[in-house]
């Protein structure tokens, strides 16, 4: 088995290193370099940086059409393994390989698509996982070769759960490929759900919702796009939250969105449509992120204000 490893972001780095240690990677397919922030020129994707450190050949096509297929055909690879690559593989590209695999960070058929980690947190799932599947023409519809379950405790952020997936992926994928048999496939069972691209407005909070739902949005939007509400006409980003979304709701009588008070060790206590939520960190307009109590010390007048 000689793998073309198709991946782009940080989440795929540990698996790349593990596969390289096994001598399985023939080349790496990743996204083109992209413009950096504040005019810093083109920035290579993390997978490219790691691949070059490992001495692996890297290919960064803009599309996967004829020129790309001819280039891949000459790389001497027979297996495609994708992990959050970012492009769709067509039938002609897939036909270049004896075997095709995709690492998807959910328990398929739940949360097919491009944002499964965000979706698992936002949906208040009690568990998620990783699936090693065959690449199909439909979005994440391929048969499953191996899977791993991860329990969730209601405190995970998208960033922390991505780190867990990154660290766990090698222990699932490497043994499955080392002892691969096409007879070990399983069809996906159950009702599928789908995820889409995340935008800034996905972080807009609605305090008429329950405390657990708002808790989930704040965590799902960390580190990006960041959850926010409007305070006196300006966005206030809520970047940290205390406790678990699975904790029982406290009785609440104030209007949803009211900043009631502050509790040491927890943060700002805010009323919701069902229960209170404790916000531990905030990002005010044109300022740096800070803990919520420090923000309150400089803005005592916010007590009693309503977040919209």
Image (cartoon, helix red, strand yellow):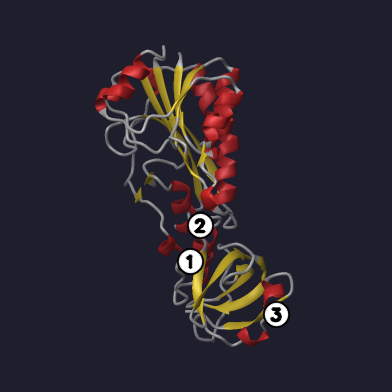
Q: Are there few (<14), some (14-19), or many (20+) residues within 10 Å of tag 2?
A: many
Q: Position of residue 270 (x, y in %)?
A: 58, 78
Q: Of circles 3 and 1, which is in front?
A: 3
Q: Is residue 152 left or right of residue 35?
A: right
Q: CA distance from mark 3 to mark 2?
A: 28 Å
Q: Position of residue 283 (x, y in %)?
A: 60, 68
Q: Which sits earlier in the primary sequence, circle 1 or circle 2?
A: 1
| Above or below, 227 relative to 138 | below
Seen at 54% across and 76% down, the residue is 275
Q: Is residue 158 left or right of residue 86?
A: right
Q: Are marks 3 and 2 in contact (CB under 8 Å)?
A: no
Residue linked to disc 1: 213
Q: CA distance from mark 3 to mark 1?
A: 29 Å
Q: Are there few (<14), some (14-19), or many (20+) residues within 10 Å of tag 3?
A: few
Q: Are marks 1 and 2 in contact (CB under 8 Å)?
A: no
The circle drawn on residue 8 is none
| Above or below, 20 relative to 111 | above
Q: Which sits earlier in the primary sequence, circle 3 or circle 2?
A: 2
Q: Which sits earlier in the primary sequence, circle 3 or circle 1?
A: 1
Q: Position of residue 161 (x, y in %)?
A: 56, 47
Residue linked to disc 3: 298
Seen at 25% across and 23% down, the residue is 92
Seen at 53% across and 32% down, the residue is 47
In the foreground, 305 or 136 = 305
In the foreground, 43 or 183 = 43
Residue linked to disc 2: 220
Q: Are there few (<14), some (14-19), or many (20+) residues within 10 Å of tag 1?
A: many
Secondary structure of the residue carrying numbered label 2: helix
In the foreground, 127 or 24 = 24
Seen at 49% across and 55% down, the residue is 121
Screen quadrant of the N terminus: top left
Secondary structure of the residue carrying numbered label 3: loop
């Amino acid at each position: 088995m000689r793998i073309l490893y198709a991946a782009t972001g940080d989440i795929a780095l540990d698996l790349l290193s593990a596969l390289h240690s096994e001598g399985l990677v023939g080349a790496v397919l990743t996204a083109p370099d992209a413009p950096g922030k504040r005019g810093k020129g083109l920035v290579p994707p993390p997978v490219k940086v790691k691949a070059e450190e490992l001495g692996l050949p890297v290919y960064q096509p803009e599309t996967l059409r004829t020129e790309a297929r001819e280039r891949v055909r000459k790389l001497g690879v027979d297996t495609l393994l994708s992990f959050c690559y970012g492009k769709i593989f067509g039938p002609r590209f897939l036909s270049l390989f004896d075997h095709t695999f995709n690492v998807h960070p959910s328990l398929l058929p739940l949360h097919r698509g491009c944002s499964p980690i965000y979706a698992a947190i936002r949906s208040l799932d009690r568990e998620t996982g990783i699936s090693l599947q065959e690449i199909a023409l439909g979005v994440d519809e391929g048969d499953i070769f191996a899977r791993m379950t991860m329990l969730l405790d209601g405190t995970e952020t998208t960033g922390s759960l991505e780190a867990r997936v990154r660290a766990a992926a090698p222990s699932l994928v490497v043994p499955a490929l080392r002892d691969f048999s096409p007879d070990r496939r399983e069809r996906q069972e159950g009702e599928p759900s789908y995820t889409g691209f995340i935008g800034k407005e996905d972080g807009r909070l609605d305090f008429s919702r329950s405390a657990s739902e708002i808790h989930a949005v704040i965590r799902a939007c960390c580190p990006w796009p960041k959850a926010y509400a409007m305070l006196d006409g300006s966005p206030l980003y809520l970047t940290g939250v205390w406790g678990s979304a699975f904790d029982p709701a406290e009785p609440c009588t104030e209007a949803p969105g009211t900043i009631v008070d502050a509790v040491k060790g927890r943060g700002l206590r805010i009323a919701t449509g069902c229960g209170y939520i404790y916000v531990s960190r905030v990002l005010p307009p044109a300022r740096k992120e800070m803990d919520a109590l420090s923000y309150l010390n400089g803005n005592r007048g916010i007590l009693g204000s309503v977040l919209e």
